[in-house]
Amino acid sequence: MISLPQAAYIHIPFCKHHCGYCDFAVVAGKDHLQTLYLEALELELTSLVNSQEIQTLFIGGGTPTYLSEPNLQRLMQMLGIWFKNYDEFSIEATPESITAEKIAILQGGGVNRISLGVQSFENHSLIELDRVHSVADIRPAIEMCNDHFPRVSLDLIFAVPEQRLEDWQRDLRAAVDFGVGHISTYGLTYEKGTPLWKRRERKEVVALDEDLEGQMYEYAMAELPRLGLEQYEISNFAKPGQECRHNQIYWANESYYGFGLGAARYLAGTRETNTRSLDNYLKKLFAGESPTQSSERLSDLDRARETIFTQLRRREGILRESFENQTGFSIDQLAGERLKPLLDNHLLIDDSVSIRLSRAGRCLADAVITELMAG
């Protein structure tokens, strides 16, 4: 059964600097196009025709808080027209882009959750990650966010070149010490074509040993729950009630809206993605055309298989009855004989109510899910 979208994602691509590891749809050095971009975004939003009732609204990027104050104010006003009745309104930010003036604008617009891209509390890791902020920027940014938003999340990256296990342990302790309710931990990936990937190809940087990366992830899985942040998804930890509801909609494989450069959406069983070219995005919308670059209508079987992929990321995994009601298939119909070896190797847990990743399975999540969906 296909439900009406309960989430909306808005993409703001502008950044002060394009970090070397990032392969998202971002632009740097084009601040003069901010106002034009918001005009185009407003044109895209008119495809909704009427204001939509949703549960969650999420502004990502890019660095949404890099927008100038007038443009940030305009964005808040625009979204207030097209979306209503949401319980969770999140925005991504970076330590160097947060100011008291911008926080006031966000509060006035209804933002009640902020996700701060700290990435590390170690300057040498920030340099390796090509970030523009330093450790000195982090404390005042987090303290401002804690003072003004009821829900604060910190993003951290591990497996940074030359990072030691003790560096990562300090990062986690520092994040927890700020008392935030949510922490996301991501292993560094070398996406093809990025400056970081090119540096590795030229032997200018060496990827961290996989065993050490595994130790870092295992430490997070053990330490954060001990300190009150339970792991509710492969990369995410939260205090009770602080889980990101917006991402939970993604992981349940439910419908959602997506607007802006490179944004993806899932509507009525169809997945669409906007162009990643800023020039094309602007030209198409000002010409009265859709910015959609790709569109795929999923079969019932494809939707069910995707649901396996997304729901296994969650701590509760795939709830058998709910999965069958949502997709029309049982998990046994789709996975069948591929379940047994994963269960026998203690990578999956099956208690007859749900199938979920074991702790060992979470460490090998991509491989487990790939194996489960093979054939």
Image (cartoon, rainbow, N blue to C red):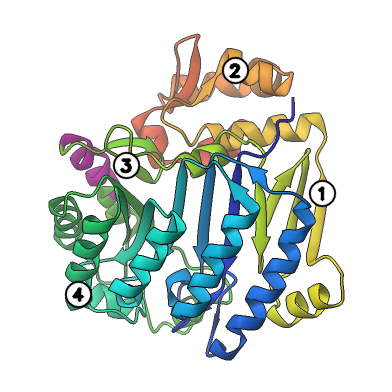
Numbered label attached to residue 135: 4
Left or right: 315, with 312 as reference point = left
Q: Residue furthest top?
A: 352
For the residue marked with disc 3, what is the amino acid? Phe
The answer to whether mark 3 and mark 1 are in CB contact below 8 A is no
Sequence-first tag of 4 and 1: 4
The residue where tag 1 is placed is 296
Numbered label attached to residue 237: 3
211 drawn magenta: no
Cα separation between marks 1 and 2:
25 Å
Cα separation between marks 3 and 2:
24 Å
For the residue marked with disc 4, what is the amino acid? Val
Cα separation between marks 3 and 4:
22 Å
Residue 158 sits above or below residue 190 on the image:
above
Numbered label tally: 4
Secondary structure of the residue carrying tag 4 is: helix
